[in-house]
Image (spheres, rainbow, N blue to C red):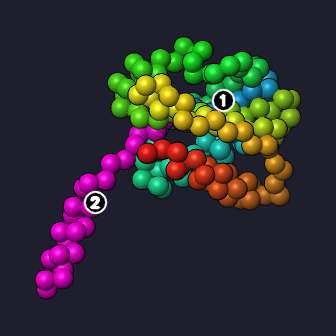
Amino acid sequence: MLKRIVLVFFVFFTVFGVEASMISFIVIETGLPQEGERNYHSVYLENALLDVFFDRGHIVCNFPIMRLEARPSGDFLQSSAYDMEEEALNAGVDYIVLAQLDYSGSQSPGEISFFIYRVRGRVKVLERQISGKTYRTARDEIDDLKIIVGELVPYLN
């Protein structure tokens, strides 16, 4: 009986002492026609981001997938109209994860770039590029994307 009481207290204090970060995702497609349909590779990546970070205990939200004609030069968030300090902090967002898929006229991304920003202080935590791959099935692509996204999680406190 004493063991159960100790276990209940231990679980109670450890569960309520854990804080989750709120993470906002922005997926950007470049190199696709503006009037084209939504690309399923981008949707798979967006779903992988949401699933992996949520499953690891974070609070997640996302912006609609953006499509730009060309790859932005320089730091996208620094040069965009998105005011990280005002909007994100007011919404309670701790981190912004930006995923940029560069299609360059192809139907599958040639390169995927990930950027992680800590909102407070406008700090870029991580910048990583990976080469696009060809997959046999959608399930293989989704599983691989979840592994890739899982490698980003440790960069968030």
User: Does the magenta portion include 78?
Assistant: no
The answer to whether 104 appears left or right of 148 in the picture is right
**Residue 54 point in image, percent of width and height:** 47, 50
Q: Residue furthest bottom?
A: 1
Q: Residue at x 74, y 43 (%)?
A: 130
Q: Quadrant of residue 73?
A: top right
The answer to whether 134 appears left or right of 73 in the picture is right
Q: In the rendered view, would you say 33 is above or below 128?
A: above
Q: Residue at x 77, y 32 (%)?
A: 102
**Residue 64 point in image, percent of width and height:** 57, 30
The answer to whether 3 appears left or right of 113 in the picture is left
Q: Residue at x 26, y 54 (%)?
A: 17
Q: Residue at x 84, y 29 (%)?
A: 104
Would residue 109 be seen by someone viewing this image from the given angle? no
Q: In the rendered view, would you say 58 is above or below 73?
A: below
As shown in the figure, which amino acid type bears the numbered disc 1? Ile
Q: Number of numbered discs present?
A: 2
Residue marked by disc 2:
15
**Residue 87 point in image, percent of width and height:** 41, 21
| Range of residues picked out in magenta | 1-25
User: Does the magenta portion include 8?
Assistant: yes
Q: Nearer the viewer, mark 1 or mark 2?
A: 2
Whichever of labels 1 and 2 marks the residue nearer the N terminus, that label is: 2
Asked if marks 1 and 2 touch (Cβ < 8 Å), the reply is no
Cα gap from disc 1 to disc 2, whole angstroms: 36 Å
Q: In the rendered view, would you say 82 is above or below 100?
A: above
The disc at residue 131 is: none
Residue marked by disc 1:
28
Q: Residues within 10 Å of mark 2 (few under 14, many from 20)?
A: few
**Residue 91 point in image, percent of width and height:** 37, 28
- Is label 2 in a helix, a strand or a loop? helix
